Image: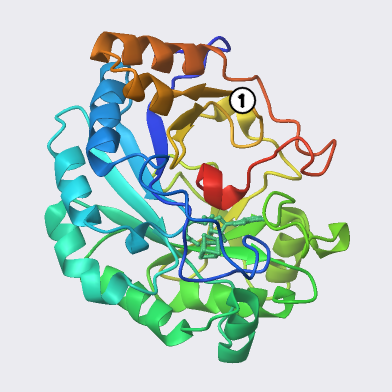
Amino acid sequence: MVDSFGRHINYMRISITDRCNLRCRYCMPEEGVKDLGHGIILSLEDIARLTRVAAQVGIRKVRLTGGEPLVRKNITGLIKDIAAIPEIDDIAMTTNGILFPAMAGELKEAGLKRVNISMDTLNEERFAYITRRGGLSSVRQAIFKALELDMHPVKINVVVIRGFNDDEINNFARLAYDYPLHIRFIEYMPVGDLLFWEPERMMSSEEIRNVLQNEYELIPEKTVEGNGPARYYQLTGGKGSLGFISPMSHQFCAECNRIRLTADGKLRGCLYEKQEVDLKEALKRGATDDELRELFLQAIKSKPARHNMNSGWGQLNTRKMYQIGG
Ligand code: SAM
Ligand code: SF4
């Protein structure tokens, strides 16, 4: 399906819960999120059905995210249902990794192909500080488990926050040098729990690249499988790669191929804009697949040309990243 600006929309990110077992300071408040309850959150059956309808309008790739997707019960069953949709050729997940080591085998068997694991620091104490919970050793295990199970490419998300982890940038690069990991440095955005946000904490991809270039030679690379907005570089002699996700300094809206389904059943064309189509309400009133398909088409058609985040610092967005699905 092509949207109003000529972009091919073939990728859907699904937030399957807005709950989480961590409380990253830039994302969630300490007290967590109010339980939305069964009546509000989409059931796993509804998510599978909506994915089948999405496949009919051209969605080929699906990413499960949240909140933390692995805290939702029976996620393995959902992955199996999505894997059974013939048009869907890629199922990935973004996870904080804490619960992944114990579940990795069954997730892969169910049809999960790839994981992005978030890890903002390599230091135990800092990890406990930023997540307000801790568990870095489980995240490390998760990364090695994903490599062991050949869930390539294994990508690591690192939100770079000045004054917190900018002195670890080269240590992360070392990880990509030693292992076949794709480290993605993400610009800190004013979209989560804004209590932690300060404009000075945002470090642009260009600044991050400058730090790296003091120690490494970066070679611009062909794209890494997965359809993301990252720009990748190889390290001379290294096994993995480095990627830069620059929503703040460089809009990648012109290449955006995605739509997002929130845990409470709203379909969004853009992470940063308020416009949503209410699929949960449609399901409640017993909409047919044809009607749902029309709603998907409506969301795709109303996808904005570009986001507006840089003007207004998050005020535009009343929902947080864990609600929309980061
Ligand atoms: N809980 C999972 C995780 O942490 O990977 C999936 C959901 S999380 C919202 C998805 C990604 O968004 C994570 O890599 C997280 O670091 C990133 N993220 C959350 N808030 C952010 C912010 N304000 N700026 C940049 N990235 C953010
Ligand atoms: Fe949870 Fe992911 Fe948000 Fe951290 S970034 S609080 S792990 S949803």
- Amino acid beneath label 1: Ala
Q: Looking at the figure, which quarter contains the N terminus?
A: top left
| Residue 303 against residue 319 in the figure, above or below | above
Tell me how many marks there are: 1
Q: What residue lies at 68% left-to-right and 63% top-to-bottom?
A: 26
Residues 326 and 220: in front is 326
Q: Position of residue 134 (x, y in %)?
A: 52, 83
Compared with 210, 101 (above or below) is below
Q: Is residue 68 left or right of residue 26?
A: left
Going by the picture, which residue comes out furthest to the bottom?
A: 125
Q: Is residue 176 above or below residue 85?
A: below
Q: Position of residue 160 (x, y in %)?
A: 68, 65
Rate crowding at label 1 as few (under 14), some (14 to 19) or many (20 or more) other CA atoms within 10 Å.
few
Q: Residue 198 or 48: which is nearer the viewer?
A: 48
Quadrant of the rendered structure where residue 193 is?
bottom right
67 lies left or right of 93: right
Mark 1 secondary-structure assignment: helix
What residue is rendered at 42% in x and 86% in y?
Answer: 137
The answer to whether residue 153 shows anywhere in this view is no
Residue linked to disc 1: 254
Res 158 quadrant in image: bottom right
Residue under the image location 54 percent in, 41 percent down: 229
- Comparing 227 with 96, the one in front is 96
